[in-house]
Image: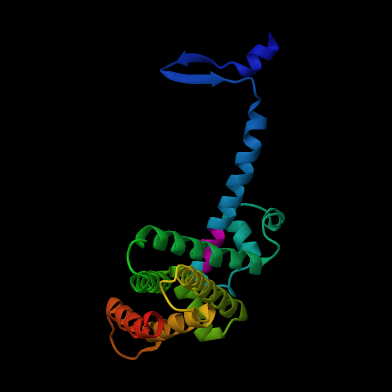
Amino acid sequence: SLFFLFFVKKSWHFFNTVIYYTGIPNWYIGIGSDKMNKKEEVINAARDLFTKYGYKKVSMDEIAKEANVTKKTIYSYFSDKEAMFKYFASEELQSMKEKIENDVNSSTSFIDRVSKILYESLLFRKNSDLIKTIIKEISKNNTAECISFLKFYDGEIVSYIEEKIKQEIQNKTIKKCDAHLTAFIIYKVYSSILFEYDREIDEEKVTKEVTNILKDGLLN
């Protein structure tokens, strides 16, 4: 019956190729994947252009041309160029957090974990091609959207460290403190040394020095 053909899989062998028939029309199967592919094309095109040229020089027309879609298609995924730009801040943060969660051993001490989080997050920031371009654009043009990008990015890392501190306070492995302020100080001190210190530095050594300073304050 037609009902049976719709759900039961049949196959034909032709020149060693197996074709499966489900009874579901091809146009129906392709709707979701085609839409997803277009969004990925838009995201990939925008990422490449922002990484090469920064925020200010890239227009929605250029992104549409690079992705081979219409601007209307782009606006169906992102409300404007700034929203798209912020998407990449979230994407960078997610990649960074996944790397940290994979690398940080939960059995090590809190100070060692904070040290690892600081090291990995700021090294990731330092090595990101997109963020390198954004920092250059800020130094040349002081572009508001790029400043907002870095502010959001840094703020999210501070929040991430803050959550780790709160967990340790709850577990009574460190004494009570203002978790947000402590996270802010830890991150800003280390990032200032990494990006503003006027001498050659060893990132791992700096991380250990900064976290050693914290030991007396947080653990004793």
* In the rendered image, the vertical position of residue 109 relative to residue 75, given as above or below: below
Q: Is 5 left or right of 177, judged from the image as shown?
A: right
Left/right of residue 152 with respect to residue 109 in the rendered view: right
Q: Nearer the viewer, residue 69 or 220?
A: 220
User: Can see residue 136?
Assistant: no
- Read off the magenta span: 45-50
Residue 199: image quadrant is bottom left
- Image coordinates of residue 18 in percent, x first then y, are 46, 19
- Occupied quadrant, residue 211: bottom left
Residue 199 falls left or right of residue 122? left
Question: In front: 197, or 119?
Answer: 119
Q: Name the dominant secondary structure of the magenta segment.
A: helix
Residue at the extreme top of the image, as rendered:
1
Q: Which residue is drawn at 28% across and 86% down?
A: 200
> Number of numbered discs present?
0
Magenta-colored stretch includes residue 99: no
Q: Residue 205: tell me if it is visible.
A: yes
